[in-house]
Image (cartoon, rainbow, N blue to C red):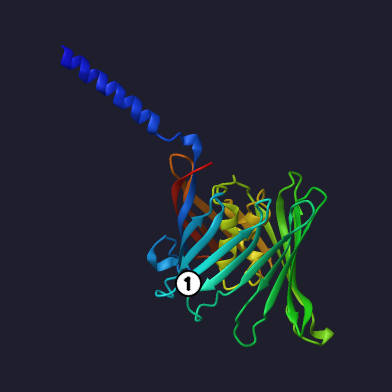
Amino acid sequence: MKLRALAALCIVLLAACTKDNTPDNQNFVTLPTKVWYYYDPTGHGDTTLTATNLYAYDTIYYNSLLQISRVVMYMPAYPNDSIVLEFNYNSGGNLTKMKMNPSNSRIYFRQTYDLRYNSAGKLDSIGIDQGVVDPGSDPWYGVQLKYNSKGNLERINSYTLVKSKVVLMSFTNFYRNSSDQTDSVDINYFDNYKSDDPALFYYTRTNIHFQNYGPNDTATLPPVYLFKLAATRTTNLVIDIHNNGFLYQYLSPKDMLMFRPGGVRTTQPLQNISYLNQLTRDENGLLTSSHNILSQNGPLFLLSGLRVQHEKFQTK
């Protein structure tokens, strides 16, 4: 009987010690540490998140404040190389610089992004230094943001340098509905911004109307990582600035234009585009995968896809 009582007491003490040594979940935060990014460049209807469509995969590192400090990006197109992205912040925790360092000069990504904020703490402009560029490429790009009286994104201007002069390349206006959500934009591209002849300086306009708003389903990705995705979706953020769902979500979190199920209609050229975002989450509601599937006058293709792996980090 005494042995049984002693054994029972040991079990109780062991359970108590185990509980005391178990970290309180309130002192931990779960963050993404690995992300795989997919897309289907062929438009042949393969919408799966498989190696065929893998564009890049990232390993994400955090500093003591649990801010993203470094991302190592690998691309199947360059199997022996990598791109290291480094991030700096101001005292308010806002991203101020993102620098890309390819391990091999063959990789195009060698850029530095400088982010500046206005007196209200909202992002005001982005400067992009191309670093070493191909002959004929523009060495610098700039982005300027404008907001309405309610602080909502109203316009994006993009600039470059032509013969040491700052030249407007394109601008996008945002129009909002009665619920103060963006329901349409017009995108204006200057086709001959490098020309000295004013007669050749004309632009084309594309009007896009967004329909069928759905819920915000990708907010579990850190905003700074969304900016990284926006900048590396193509070879330059400005080149893809007006059709970049990651950037839209970073700049105007309440809109999530490219991450909601719904439809799009453009007027230049006239075509009907529909897209559907399929998402999966784990038992804690964290995003584990995302399929952004687009149909453009027929065949389906994968506009973007993500697979996300998370880890727990202890907070102070």
Say which residue appears at 59% left-offset and 56% top-offset: 224
Tell me residue 173's x, y (percent).
Answer: 76, 61
Closer to the camera, 292 or 223? 223
Residue annotated with mark 1:
42
Picture quadrant of residue 233: bottom right
Say which residue appears at 51% left-offset and 62% top-offset: 71
Which quarter shows the N terminus?
top left
- Answer few, some or many: residues within 10 Å of disc 1's Cα (few below 14, many 20 plus, some between 14 and 19): few
Closer to the camera, 170 or 178? 170
Say which residue appears at 49% left-offset and 48% top-offset: 31
Q: Is residue 258 left or right of residue 40?
A: right
Number of marks in the image? 1
Which quarter shows the C terminus?
top right
Q: Is residue 11 left or right of residue 295?
A: left
Tell me residue 301's x, y (percent).
Answer: 49, 64
Q: Amino acid at mark 1?
A: Thr
Tell me residue 305's x, y (percent).
Answer: 48, 59
Q: Is residue 271 left or right of residue 11?
A: right
Tell me residue 146's x, y (percent).
Answer: 78, 59
Does residue 167 appear in the picture of this structure?
yes
Residue ranking furthest to the top? 1
* Vertical arrangement, residue 83 with respect to residue 291, above or below: below
